[in-house]
Structures are given as structure tokens and as C-alpha cells.
Amino acid sequence: MKKSKALRRDILQLNFELYLFFLLPAVVVTFIFIYIPMWGAQIAFRDYLPTKGIWGSAWVGLRHFTRFVNSYQFFNLLKNTLGISIYQLLAGFPLPIILALTLNQLKNGFFKRFTQTVTYAPHFISVVVLVGLLQIFLNPRNGLVNVMFMAMGKDPVYFIGIEKYFWHLYIITGIWQSTGWGAILYLAALSGIDPELYEAAKIDGTSRLQRILYIDIPGILPTVVILFILNTGRLMNVGFEKTFLMQNPLNLGASEVISTYVYKVGLLQAQFGFASAVGLFNGVVNLILLFLVDRIAKRLGSGGLL
């Protein structure tokens, strides 16, 4: 152990300039686009006016945060944001794992490549196009779904305009678009498993299901834990673009989330300080969730991210 540490230290010292050359651009970009903008977070604590600038605007402390927490929309925004995110995590997170485990068992090369292509392709469809297709298929007059309903003697349904359907439509389309792409990381992790383990398991007479349970799943478990922690850390970040495009006055009670609310009060109503406070509140909650889930994962002995 001591020899390996000494060897790594010597390699680092001998190639210090090379490491610096490769790392410096990433450090500079991160500093410019991540850390310097944090200086503007103080807008959340000021009554910001563009004509006065950040330093010239009056300091109001936690007034914007208090206003947001006490507003009548707070609990509905929190319910929709957390509800959609948790629903998406529970319904969508296991599916790429299942798809990767299934694809890993396919022996027919052509069928495996064809399946991968079909499942990956939706990822490259623009969100705007996806929502447009959804509205076309669910159109109450001539959409495919409602045409089938009317052919069966049922009344057409305006699915996008009904609140109780919004979450389901959002999650189902998200799963269709992201499952194949999400399976790539798990397939990469599966490819790193020692083939000798499979050979030994076959000699011992194990079934395919047993090899999945006792070789594949333990082999990708560290990757699963890390991705789960990262997904939990984005729990409050419901996709703005897709949510905003699917919104209409009829489903607003189920579709209004923090990201769309920040857009409306910040850019449309020019309440920059208040919108910054709401966005900062959202980021702090995500950070707390990230640390909490990471600590739980470490306590359970599954490793962690931090």
C-alpha cells in the first residue's frame, strides 16, 4: 500500500505540467461559468432593480423567501414539483436497469443492435417535437386516440386539458424518451464484469435468472447507487421546457411547478429578486436531499458520492 502511494506521488510529481495542462481549461471554465455566477445569488436578498444594479438595490434579507413560503401557491407548487419528480424517479429509474439487464442476455447480435437502436432513438427527438406529437395524437377532434374512442362509441377526451392525466402523460412520455439512453451506462458497467464469473456460474449449473441476480446486479450496484443519488439531487428540478409546453389554463393546477413559476414571476413580471429567491430555495432543497441520500447510502454500506 505504501509503495503504491509513493509510486502515484512520484508519477504526479514527474508529470505535474502535463496534468496541469489537461486540467487547467476545465478548472477555468468551471470557475467562470459555475462559481463566478454565484456572486449574483445575492439578488435573492435584495429588492433588485436593473437600473440600480446589484450593489445599488436595497437589501431586504429574507423577505422574498418569507413571501414565497407564505404565498397561497407554495404548497401547490411544492406538491406538483415533488410529486412529478418522485413519480418519475420511482417509475422511470428502474426501467433502464431492467432494459440493460435484458439486452445483456440477448445472444442474437442483429436483434440486440436493432433493439438498442429502437430504444435509443427517442432520446434524440426534441422536446418541442415530442409535445407536438403528443398533442396531435391526443387531439379531441381528430387525434388517433380519440378517433379510436369514437369508433368504439365513446366520447372524445381532451387528455391534456384534464389535471388528473397530466402527471401520467408527463411521466409516460419521459420514460419512452429516456429509458433506452439511460440503459447505456448500465450496459457499460455490465461489460466490465469478468466473463470468467459467467463461465464458472454456468459450470455450477446456475440458471440465467440466477446469473442476473448474483452476478449482473451486484456488478452494476455501485453505478446504480451513484446514479440514484444524482437523480435524487435533482428531485426539485422538473424539466421546465416540457412542463411549460404541456401547460394550458385547464391543467394549471397540476402542471405549475417551481421552474415555470420562476419564469413567470421573474421574466414575465420582472420580479427578479423574488424569482431568484424561489430558485435559490429550490437549489438549497436539492442540495439537502443530495447530502441526505448520500449519507443514507453510506450507512447502508452501498457506497456514496461525496
Image (spheres, grey):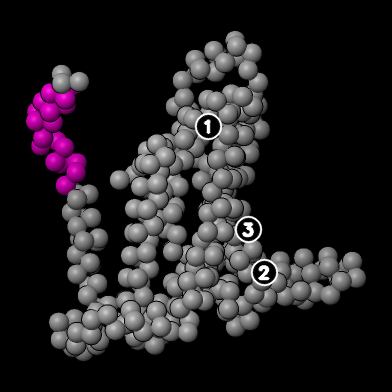
Q: Is residue 188 visible?
A: no
Between 144 and 238, which is closer to the camera in this rendering? Answer: 238
Whether the residues at callouts 2 and 1 have beta carbons within 8 Å, the answer is no
Residue shown at 14%/82% (left/top)?
55
Q: Which residue is mark 3?
A: 172
The part of the image, by quadrant, that contains residue 43 is: bottom left
Residue shown at 23%/85% (left/top)?
60
Q: What is the span of residues highlighted in magenta in the rendered image?
A: 4-24
Asked if residue 140 lies left or right of residue 264, the reply is right
Q: Which residue is mark 1?
A: 217
Of callouts 2 and 3, the N-terminal one? 2
Question: Label 1 is placed on what type of residue?
Answer: Ile
Q: Is residue 205 visible?
A: yes
Which quadrant of the figure contains the N terminus? top left
Position of residue 274 measured from the top left corner of the image (x, y, whole percent): 33, 82
Asked if residue 155 lies left or right of residue 19, the reply is right
Question: Label 2 is placed on what type of residue?
Answer: Tyr
SS assignment at label 3: helix
Between 76 and 12, which is closer to the camera in this rendering? Answer: 76
Tell me: residue 169, above or below residue 271: above
Tell me: residue 267, above or below residue 170: below
Of callouts 3 and 1, the N-terminal one? 3
Question: Label 3 is placed on what type of residue?
Answer: Ile
Tell me if mark 3 has few (under 14), some (14-19) or many (20+) residues whose alpha carbon lies within 10 angstroms of its own: few
